[in-house]
Amino acid sequence: MQFPVQRLLNRATWVKVHLYLALIAGFFFALMGLTGGISVYREELDELLNSKLVIEQPAGKRQSLDKIMAAVQAAHPNRYGSWTLEMPRSAHGMITVWYDKPRETFFELYAPLMVSVNPYTAEVVASRFWGQTATTWLLDLHTQLRLDRFGWNAVGILGLLLMVSIGTGVYLWWPGWRGIRDALRIRHDAGMIRLAFDLHRMIGLLSASILLLLSFTGFHLSYPAILEALTGSSGMEHGETGRNIISTAIPNNHPVELESAEFVARAPFPRAELRRVTTPAGDSGIYRINLRQASEINQRHPYTTVWVDRWSGQVKEVRDPSGFTSGQTFTTWVWPMHTGEAFGATGRFVWFLAGIGLFVLYVSGLLQWLHRHGKVRDRKVNLATLRPLFYRLQKMSCRAGLVLFRLAVLLLQKAKRYVPHVIKAYAALWQWLHSMIISRQKRVGKDNWK
């Protein structure tokens, strides 16, 4: 029996889909939005909560990377293996030295040791574990619901469901060309429930494109293999180097030091900014130096990488994003687009508003549902005392709308050259899913015939 298309396109069907998604997963959508919006400013919030991580008056030259690493090893003499030094983003920030698998949190999905070092004095200021600070705990809640691998996969599924919820919400909002003006009105004098309804529609409309992008990128961050398969860019997921390079030189008594390895790595990219240095582990280990070129969209996690042999000082391999395929380049955009850093300070602020807006959408929608079932009474809203604030918010909304429009135009301009590849990839995915459905129907039909 064929499923009637008229029933699928029925507005009442999409109302139920939107409602049931909100009732079942709405709380988690709101949680993702709230924690994600706050985590946009994770570093700034961490420095606000821990004043010792901020250098008030930077003075003198920075200590060498070798002195920084010696101070870290003196503070943690029983930790062996590879360390990663992350350079500060400003003159007032600390160098963060990461140790990926400390014994204290070895069996957790992701809980490295974070050592904060003053770059001017080589003083170890703080040693903390990921997930045991307020900001990293909040980010773990956003990325994995504090449930390790199961939570990580669940968040990916939530991203997929959020895309469906946003799509149905926009479809249900559309009033036709003649009704657009009335649909954009916010009636604050018609009662609390009506105000909640109007705010729900307005905020949903303004944030729909951003939330779609966030849910799309969030899904692929949880399931990077899907995007890699579609774009032909294996080993390009966030946090992966994509290569397993080892030293082939004979160990000797004069290994290359950190500063020397950085100097060698800068030769192919003299104008690039140093972002990370990963030290070798064992005799076959190798230096991995991450640099950022001006053309890269990634700020914290650039893809320009140079591998330097610790014994011979030779460059073993170079990864230059300017030589990436279109699929690889598209993959490198996922993380900075999800965090908003791809669009600078303005983009991060808009992403913050979109995350908070998702929380407001859940609260306003839940209020309407509770009123419809007699759990909440309607009441008048007196905005006289809040009128000046309301006007300021209205002006800010207009400005935010302009910013969103400019960001959308910028995103479309940057993505124009990659759209055909993405469409081709998803067409292949759809064809594969369609063939699977057809084959399953045939098997079911044979079983019923038997």
Image (cartoon, rainbow, N blue to C red):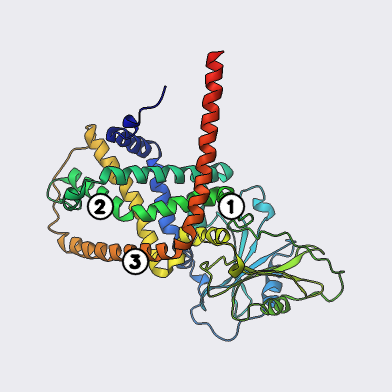
Q: Tell me if residue 293 can be seen.
A: yes
Dot 1 amino acid type: Glu
Circle on res. 406: 3
Q: Identify whether 43 is placed above or below 119.
A: above
Of 133 and 194, nearer the camera is: 194
Q: Residue visible at 59% across and 68% down? A: 321
Q: Earlier in the sequence, mark 2 or mark 3?
A: 2
Give the x, y percent position of residue 217.
Answer: 48, 53
Closer to the camera in the image, 358 or 107: 358
- Under mark 2, the amino acid is Met
Q: Nearer the viewer, mark 2 or mark 3?
A: 3
Q: CA distance from mark 1 to mark 2?
A: 36 Å
Quadrant of res 247: bottom right
First in sequence, mark 3 or 1: give its number.
Answer: 1
The one nearer the camera, 67 or 363, is: 363
Q: Residue at x 40, y 51 (%)?
A: 212
Q: Residue furthest bottom?
A: 60
Amino acid type assigned to the residue bearing label 3 in the image: Arg
Q: For the residue labelled by badge 3, is the local secondary structure a helix, a strand or a loop?
A: helix
In the picture of the structure, the residue carrying the numbered disc 2 is: 202
Q: Number of callouts in the render?
A: 3
User: Secondary structure beneath disc 1?
Assistant: helix
Please determine whether, in this image, residue 379 is positioned above or below residue 417. above
Looking at the rendered image, the quarter that the N terminus falls into is top left
Q: Which residue is mark 1?
A: 228
Which callout, 1 or 2, points at the residue further toward the start of the chain?
A: 2
- Helix, strand or loop for disc 2: helix
